[in-house]
Every structure is written in structure tokens, then in C-alpha cells.
Amino acid sequence: MLGALPTRYFLTCGSGDASTELNAFDAALIRAGVGDTNLVKLSSILPPRAREVVLYELPKGAMIPLAYAERISSEKGALISAAVAVGIPQDPDAAGLIMEFSRLGDSGPCEEAAREMVREGMETIRGIRIREIKSISVSHVVQRVGAVFAAVVLCP
Amino acid sequence: MLGALPTRYFLTCGSGDASTELNAFDAALIRAGVGDTNLVKLSSILPPRAREVVLYELPKGAMIPLAYAERISSEKGALISAAVAVGIPQDPDAAGLIMEFSRLGDSGPCEEAAREMVREGMETIRGIRIREIKSISVSHVVQRVGAVFAAVVLCP
Amino acid sequence: MLGALPTRYFLTCGSGDASTELNAFDAALIRAGVGDTNLVKLSSILPPRAREVVLYELPKGAMIPLAYAERISSEKGALISAAVAVGIPQDPDAAGLIMEFSRLGDSGPCEEAAREMVREGMETIRGIRIREIKSISVSHVVQRVGAVFAAVVLCP
């Protein structure tokens, strides 16, 4: 790292249930297809001209940068949701913005909140035009300990 | 990364106000000049012989390691502060120590607290002599949701 | 990073006491032998065929990826513990799983909890066989502000 620039990305999400918080989170990562990697959390910018790819099998144990939302709960029966949204700018030389949101309740309002945060960050705060917003969300009803996870994964 | 060694650094800070916590934090990052990068949080050591540089335009979306303090509040009218301090050792082969602090209230005591933490970490705990302590701080009165951010950014 | 793959690892732990949370944590890192590095927290997978090494002197200020448990307390007299466990799979091409746990109280149950989390994650959730579980733990009685830290450090 130290200046490394991701060139590709994909959106993914998952949920899991287990007997501890960390195991539930791990199970959600597995469902999202990133369970056997070493995730490195970033503050969340999409580099200019980054290209969306389909989720592929990442090398086991590799260090993978990403921006993510998560929610973990041990309240049986609770509905939990997580969402990410990424704004693609009209200007291909501008950066995109990734926003994360999680909440108690359904995933629809969760995903809409993440999209609205992208609009505020790009249009209102940065004053740049959005070409498109991509987003993904997941919800889960807690059985023992439940976790939801939604991410924009950045790749070399 | 995996052993990458930063050779340059700069101190920066900023504040922001928006309608959500993440947007306020993002606005503070923009004001600090690092809003379009992917920040990677470190535990905070200044490598020996690292050289201070002036804030420059970082590549959009690049992964940038840093140590930072932040505070986010939605209590309208509240005064929030964040500060970082970095101790430069007398021995050029020793590591420097970065400390972060944030609080409700003015930035002066916040910055002094970070400087005192550097003194304790270097003189009392490590038993090494300090040549100089550099520090920076910022404060902000919350309007909707407010955020303050102060950082030592490490560069290749 | 961006896909970097650690090939070696070691387990370490330490405790510290100081006048602030960050100084106590820093003191624990020093005792664990990683106090002068820039730690980057990972989500915690052991790459296939990674080799255990003895703790060695890491370059000062280098960026070091790791998975860790920590606990900080300012309750004088409190006993705090932190542990990590890493499961080594029977299949050398499978990934290992690192789990972290911390608690108020003695280190024995803390370490056992981390080991049990590895069993659940590898056997129950991933359905893979474990060859061996390595673990380490530390406890500390708080004097002023106390910190415990246990980690699996990943190296190039």
C-alpha cells in the first residue's frame, strides 16, 4: 500500500448466525464470498476509472481492502440490516464515494439511507455530478447471535 | 505494505458539518485535504528519519496510512476538538511516537493532552529523549452533525 | 498490500499500565515486542502454508498486519485478560482461522473461549478439520489505566 491504487471493485453482502459475535461476523463474511481473506478497512473512496467486476475467488489469506457496513446483535428475533452504496461520478477523472449504513429493521430503508448519504457527499458537499449510484443490502433475523455485512471490495 | 516503511509525513486537521455522522466525517476529511483518499488507520509510530513535508495533493483513491483523532457529535451547539502530536526523538535512529486525543471542549487542552501523552510514551515509558514535539488541533461548534479530525499522514 | 500474502506469523502478548488509555495500550505493545511498529488490523485469516517463526525485531515504523484482542480499563484493581487462538487446518491448502477474545477476569477462560471460537469457525461453520490450535493469553491487574494485548502478527 502506501499509495497503492485499486483499479477494480465489486459489491457483495452476506449474513450469518453463530454462538459468538466474531463467529457470526465470520459466517457473514463467508456468505459474502470474502470469508477466507484478511480484510483491511478503508475510509471509502472509489478511485477514478475503477472498473466493476464480478465477485471472484480471492486468494486465501490475501490482504483485501474494502469499505463495509456491519451490524451484530444477540437479541433473538431482531431484524438487522446493512447496506453500502457507491456513487459513480459523471467526470471519469473524479473519485467516487462509498457510504455505509446499518440499522435495526428492514434493508430497504437501510439501502436508501446509504444512497442518500452518497448524494449528500458528492452533490452537496463536493459539488460533483453523479452518473449512477450502485448499492447492495442484506437483512437477517437473529437466531443466536446474528451478523449482517455489506461491502465494496477494492482489488488491484 | 507487509513491512512498507513510510519516509515522509505531514500533519493536518479539519472539521465538517452535515446531516449524518459519516457525511460530517467525510466533510472534515475534505477540509483536511485527504477527503478523496482511502485512509488506513495505523497504531502510530513515526519511522526513524521520516521527513516532514507540506500537505500535497494525494492521488484520488490511493491508500494512505495515517494516525488520527476524531470526534463526531449530533448535540447542537456542542464544542468538539481533536488533536494529534508527534514526538521527534533526539536520536535519529529511534522511532517517533504519535498520540491522538479528542474531547468535548476547546482545542487548547486537547492539543496539550496529546503532547503530554507523547512525553509519557517517549520519556517515561521508552526512556528516550525528545528533540521536538509537533502538534495540531481543531475545534468545531456542532450545527447538525459535526466532526473534527486531526492526523499525522504517512507517505512513501 | 492489495492482495499481499503473508507467509510467516508469530503469536505474542503483553500488558501495560500508564496514565491514559493510549499510553497503556502503547506500553502493552512494547512488552509484546511490537511497540515501535505501525500496526494494521486485519479481519483474521492465516494464509495456507504460513510458517510460524519466533518473534524478531521488526523494522521501526514498518507497517505490520496483525489480528489482535485488547482490553483497556481504568478500574483500579480490575483483572483484565486478552487472548488469541489460531487454528491450523489438516489440509495444508486450506486457510487457518484466527480468533480474538478479551474479558474481565482471568486469562484461562479467555484463552479457552478463543480456542472454542476457532473450533466453531473451522469445524462447524467451514466444515474443515483442525490439525492443531495455537493460542496465547495475558492478564493484568489495573493500577492506573491498564491494557492487555494478544496478537497473531503476520509477516512477509
Image: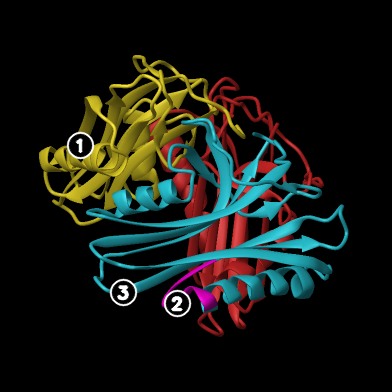
Chain colours: A cyan, B red, C yellow
Give the image location of residue A143, x and y in percent. Answer: 25, 65
Task: Give the vertical position of C29 relative to A101 (above or below).
Answer: above
Q: Residue C59 or C7: which is nearer the viewer? A: C7
Q: Rounded to the nearest whole Å, what is the CA distance between mark 2 and mark 3? A: 10 Å
Q: Looking at the image, which is closer to me, C108 or C87?
A: C87
Please name the amino acid that badge 2 sits on. Asp
**Residue A79 picture location, percent across and down:** 36, 74
Nearer-the-camera pick, B134 or B43: B43
Amino acid carrying mark 3 in the image: Ala
According to the image, label 1 marks what residue? C115
Could one spot residue A38 in this view of the protein?
yes
Q: Secondary structure at mark 2?
A: loop
Q: Which residue position is annotated with label 2?
A: A106
- Neighbourhood count class around disc 2 (C-alpha, 10 Å): few under 14, some 14–19, many 20 upward: some
Evaluate whether residue C17 shows in this view.
no
Residue B56 marker = none
Where residue A43 appears, as percent x and y from the top left, is 60, 53
Residue B16, placed above or below residue B50 = below
Q: Chain of mark 1?
A: C
What residue is disc 3 on? A78
The x and y percentages for residue A8 are 70, 43
Q: Is residue A65 left or right of residue C149?
A: right
Residue at (81% x, 47% y) in the render: B57
